Image (cartoon, grey):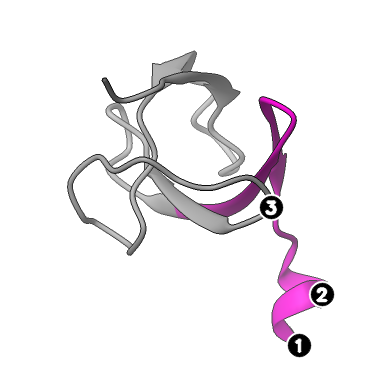
Amino acid sequence: MLSSYPVACPHEGCGWTGSLVPSSVPGGGGAEIAAAQRAWFRCPRCQRDWEARISNDRVTVVSDAEHGG
């Protein structure tokens, strides 16, 4: 069974909150993600992806700074 996580879309102007199943790639289908692995979520409202880390059932958004941006 795939696990969903409570998340909030981090994109400016969206504001969607709810539960989503992560993906192992941007725009991909739901997948089980091991602890501390990077995961991707797609907002059902704005249809944009964001990268996060999952650790102890907690989702942390990966910032642009971590990407070198």
The answer to which of marks 3 and 2 sits earlier in the sequence is 3
Q: Point out which mark residue 68 bears.
A: 1
Nearest to the observer: residue 67 or residue 13? 67
Please indicate whether residue 7 sits to the left or right of residue 58 in the image: left
Element carrying mark 2: helix
Contact, CB < 8 Å: mark 3 with mark 2? no
- Was residue 63 drawn as part of the magenta stretch in this picture? yes
Identity of the residue drawn at 57% across and 59% down: 38
Nearest to the observer: residue 64 or residue 34? 34
Residue type for callout 2:
Ala
The answer to which of marks 3 and 1 sits earlier in the sequence is 3
Q: CA distance from mark 3 to mark 2?
A: 18 Å
Contact, CB < 8 Å: mark 1 with mark 2? yes
Residue 68 location (% of width, % of height):
76, 87
Q: Quadrant of the C terminus?
A: bottom right
**Disc 3 vs disc 1: which is toward the camera?**
3
Q: Point out which mark residue 36 bears.
A: 3
Q: Over which residues does the magenta segment extend?
A: 50-69
Q: CA distance from mark 3 to mark 1?
A: 20 Å
Q: Please identify the quarter of the rendering in which residue 58 is found.
A: top right
Element carrying mark 3: loop
Q: Quadrant of the N terminus?
A: top left
Please indicate whether residue 28 sits to the left or right of residue 43 in the image: left
Q: Mark 2 — residue?
A: 65
Residue 30 location (% of width, % of height):
24, 40
